[in-house]
Amino acid sequence: MSLVVMKFGGTSVEDATAINRTASIVAGRVAAGKRPVVVVSAMSKVTDQLLACAAAASRGDRTGALALSSRLRSRHRDTAAALVQNPKNCATLQTSIEHEFDALDEILRGLAVILELTPRISDLIVSYGERLSSAMIAQAFRERGLNSVHVDSREVILTDSQFQKAIPLDALIEERCLLKVRPHLDAGLVPVMGGFIGSNEAGITTTLGRGGSDFTGALIGGALRAEAIEIWTDVNGIMTTDPRICPDALRVKVISFEEAAELAYFGAKVLHPATILPAVRRNIPVLVLNSRNPTNEGTRIISLAPHCKSPFKCIAVKKKLTIIDVVASRLLMTHGYLKSIFDIFDKHQCPIDMVSTSEVSVSVTVDSNDKLPAIADDLSKIADVKYEGQKALVCMVGEDIRGQMGISARVFTAIKHVNVRMISQGASEINMSFMIEEEDAEEAVRSLHAAFFQNPDPAIFDIENRLPAAPPLTPSTPSS
């Protein structure tokens, strides 16, 4: 029997109906002779609501925080009651839910007194989403005839102590998987675990950062040498671009690890950017599938994808970016100048998306955040600094872009009506990126998609289910 890790996102476990669909999908894998390990997110929107509880308590709004927690308590109790019909099992599950929320409320009361939301406390509060969902789903699986067992991810996913974005300790995770997960698989059970959460070696709860449930699935898959890692979401796979921007976007049937990683980092929402890494190291295929349409074959991510006749496979957009211009004409070419700039970004733990240099300046793009004034203040000690927000990065991913004659001309002809602020081509063989005003991003994507996906390669793209493109907008005639 082959081992498969199945990760289900928040929309796949958002309520009793969705959890029943998930149970049917897992049962289908078991019936097909697979040995699944199931990793689940918190129910949809629960993490955001837990963060809102924490924020309210940290402001001293004890009543508001507890009211939000009470609504979450009711939602989980109602879902559990709908899932588990056996009176004894339902009572046990309800008692567990009450215990978890009682503990959460104690934390919120304490936070409302100390008025300081530390990263460590934040991780502890948001961890309740996955802890509750995984325990509830394990019981729901048993109710439906699946021999499932709940495994606390904090006993398996060991990390460092960088709260809110902890770094996994791969060797220790592999040891814990063999100790805590493998015996259940060997006994014919289906382990159910919460994604996103872990603990440091002292046993203190940590998280892998938003979107980290995908990462958990890949870490487990890599540690157990899984045959495949399945990421179950609410779309049919990776699309050529966001269908909300282009309704005629196509499903990508197959894509390489490298291409998928570029897309994830530069704005594609289907995968967490770090998800691919454990799979790449073990050469484990990753499948992106739709829990609402489980018969769809989704997107297969593998080490070496087939050749694509189309120049690009996908267009991703990353919004809410800022361009920082650092100008010091007399220092730019001096030894150590660039290092001193990047040391400042490292000091503030601010990642950089794109870099461009000229004779007298360095321009970088970063996520807009509250650290920018402090970064600018430090940079101003070595150079003149200015920054502009509300920018968007458009990333086009495909094979051997660097070697395609005339590709730049085709791209910028397609968006000749859009002002381009920065360009990056050549640093990567599979990625061409440029910065534009955020308000122009969707129009740019539509223009590029129309230009490059008129005759897509049927071996790579699902053209059979393609929707017609939206008609071009025409000026309306003013009424008399």
Image: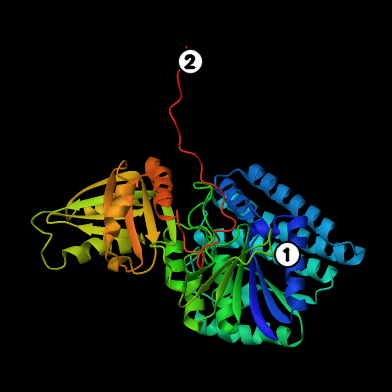
Q: Is residue 132 left or right of residue 447?
A: right
Say what amino acid the circle numbered 1 marks: Thr
* x and y, in percent, of residue 56 in the image: 58, 45
- What is the residue that sits farthest to the right in this orientation? 87
Circle 2 sits on which residue?
479
Q: Are marks 1 and 2 in contact (CB under 8 Å)?
A: no
Q: Residue 22: give its label.
A: 1
* x and y, in percent, of residue 63 in the image: 66, 43
Question: Mark 1 and mark 2: span between their CA atoms?
Answer: 53 Å
The secondary element bearing badge 2 is classed as loop
Q: Is residue 202 left or right of residue 79?
A: left
Q: Nearer the viewer, residue 92 or 249?
A: 249
Residue at the image position 51 percent from the left and 85 percent from the top: 171
Quarter of the rendering occupied by the N terminus: bottom right
Say what amino acid the circle numbered 2 marks: Ser
Q: Residue 328 occupies which quadrant of the picture? A: bottom left
Residue at the image position 59 percent from the left and 51 percent from the top: 48
Q: Is residue 339 above or below residue 241?
A: below
Q: Nearer the viewer, residue 222 or 239?
A: 239
